[in-house]
Amino acid sequence: MLSLHNLSVSTADTQIITSLSLDIPTGQRVALMGPNGSGKSTLAATLAGHPDYVVTDGSMSYNGIDLLSCEPHERAQAGVFLAFQYPVSLPGVPLSQFLRIARQELDAAQGRTPLTHTDFLKLLKSSLAVVGLPVSFAQRAVNEGASGGEKKRLEMLQLLVLEPSLVIIDEIDSGLDVDALRAIGSAITNLPRTTTCLIITHYQRLLEYAPVDRVVILQNGSITSDGGPELAQTVEVSGYQQ
Amino acid sequence: MSFTPPSYQFGFADPESSRARTERGLTEATVREISALKNEPRWMLEKRLAGFAAFQAAKFPSWGPDLSKLHLDEITFFSRATDRAERTWDDVPDRIKTTFDRLGVPQAERALLAGVGAQYDSEAIYHNLKQEWQDLGVIFCDMDTAVREHPELVQKYFGTIIPATDNMFAALNTAVWSGGSFVYIPKGVKLSVPLQAYFRINANQVGQFERTIIIAEPDSYVHYVEGCSAPTYSDSALHAAVVEVFCKSESRVRYTTIQNWSNAVYNLVTKRAVADRAATMEWVDCNLGSQVTMKYPSVLLREPYSRAEILSLAIAGSGQHQDAGAKAIHLAPHTSSLITSKSVSFGSGRTSYRGIVKATKAAHHVTSKVVCDALLLNDESRSDTYPTIDIQHEDNQIEHEASVSKVGEEQLLYLQNRGLKPEVATALIVNGFMEPIVKELPMEYAVEMNRLIELEMEGSVG
């Protein structure tokens, strides 16, 4: 269960999120929608612990763990994963090496049985197939020289390999062609039912490939609507203006 | 972020038990004593005395890192731990064998290198070359042995690229040199596996002054690899080596150094190569550890179509200054050079790139490229570049690129978001930064290098 209560978030000079409260039970799939600048990506970055976003009020917890007192890596170890909208590249760091280390750190922190090297490679290979990337990506430097679409697939790939329990996906659909959208949508759909998902998107398009249980609309840093999947279609037809 | 000094895994010391060692400080008597202890021929004593004269006339460099705490009168200039260079590993005294086992030296030979040499304090204790290479006329021995067994070659080449008057530490080395490797590759012989040497300073306040000569006859190839370490003492030790490499026409020499001195060592080394027609000289120079390093591997491109490639890697933590770089001197037309320098600074560490690219009037159609990348891990660390470009022709194509970056907050956050602790994340970013150079190392060294870097970084970020 992810619990946000009266959360207010600011950057250096601007308040972006005001008194936001949201509970997401384990296993629920939620789409967070809203116009540009409504605070969606700020919320994602805040959950991940980005130092540029300061929580000025309220609380934020996941499975009873106070996320505000956790460093970014401790949040990851608690099971939180953010798929970035603009992932950075890591020159000289091979993807497989990076994911192997990350998986080991997470397994150790969460008390999961560590994967053998062979099982890890199997998981990596099958996940590359799920997101539609060639095996050669395993030896390439993380995100280095990758196209926009490949970077999104790589974010999805990492999610599949690291197996977090709470997934926050930040506008993964922007700039994607239909094939990529379908691949990513089905990867989300095929996540274990116990995985909690917060999918941030502008458009209803992604939700056709990755159906959700609930849609939350964010405008000007506050939640203005909270309903079932049909809410996304309403937005698609008549926009965010009520 | 807070920073603590790195740990150093080779900081153990054996009990000192030198068979012979000279008084501290340097006098002409010391120079004569070293020569006498080695039963050297007259001509070598004369070279030493000329070196001593040059040393007395020389001054400390007026530029570069602070050497004011280097007290030469407190250094022991010669220390002998064993009576002669042994040929089989079994002959090496157990005490020294244990040290090298801890450092993993003979394992390297087991991994099928062409030959291994090891030097402890001043003198070589072990040199071995596989029979198949000996049969082809390859010579790989310590320099003392070369003076005895190949005097005509040593006399012909010794000090011809780096004369005693070149700089103060080259003068000092010429006067008191001991050990080092002598490598001779006959015409047309291409060694398919590297030759390896290992240098270790064990005793406190001892200087190590190895002298290395590599002669690659036309159309030959050799890869020579050296590793260096020393125990951790609070007093300064001095390493002032001189390396001369002769690349005859169409030969190729790669000289790889993995230096990992403890933080007490002043590492002041002169390395220079000459490249003849269509020859290729490659320096791969990795500098970890030491208190101060001053090292600028150089190539004199003296005949057309010769090529130089210099890869320099420096890592400086608190209390360390790595002043490293490269020199490419183009003396002939159609010559090319590529210099890649990468440095990482953390704590109060400081790295400098200092380099020269020069092309004389005779050198037209020269291409040269210099790329310097520095990575800073915190606000206190520092990096500078001192590039000198001196080109006499307009048609020459010279590029210089320099970048300084800090470990990005975005990169750290990204890796942390995947579950990595900040120190693991930083080590991964640093390893990635250095990957273009580390991938040039032989496999077992590349693995070792990454491990050393992780050890250096341990506890450095938090």
Image (spheres, coloured by chain):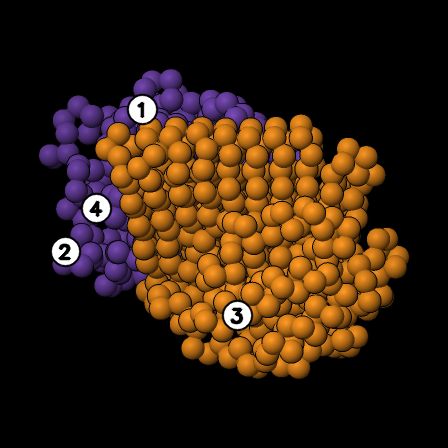
Nearer-the-camera pick, A202 or B362: B362
- Badge 3 sits on which subunit? B
Q: CA distance from mark 4 to mark 2?
A: 11 Å
Q: Quadrant of the C terminus of chain B?
A: bottom left
Q: Earlier in the sequence, mark 2 or mark 1?
A: 2
Give x and y (percent) for residue A183. Answer: 42, 23
Chain whose colour in the figure is orange: B
Q: Quadrant of the N terminus of chain B?
A: bottom left
Q: Which residue is tagged 4?
A: A39
Residue A99 seen by the camera: no
Q: CA distance from mark 4 to mark 3?
A: 75 Å
Write the residue at 18% across / 52% down.
A16
Q: Earlier in the sequence, mark 4 or mark 1?
A: 4
Q: Which residue is tagged 2?
A: A14
Write the residue at 65% across / 78% down.
B29
> What amino acid type should be assigned to the residue bearing mark 1?
Leu
> What amino acid type should be assigned to the residue bearing mark 3?
Ala
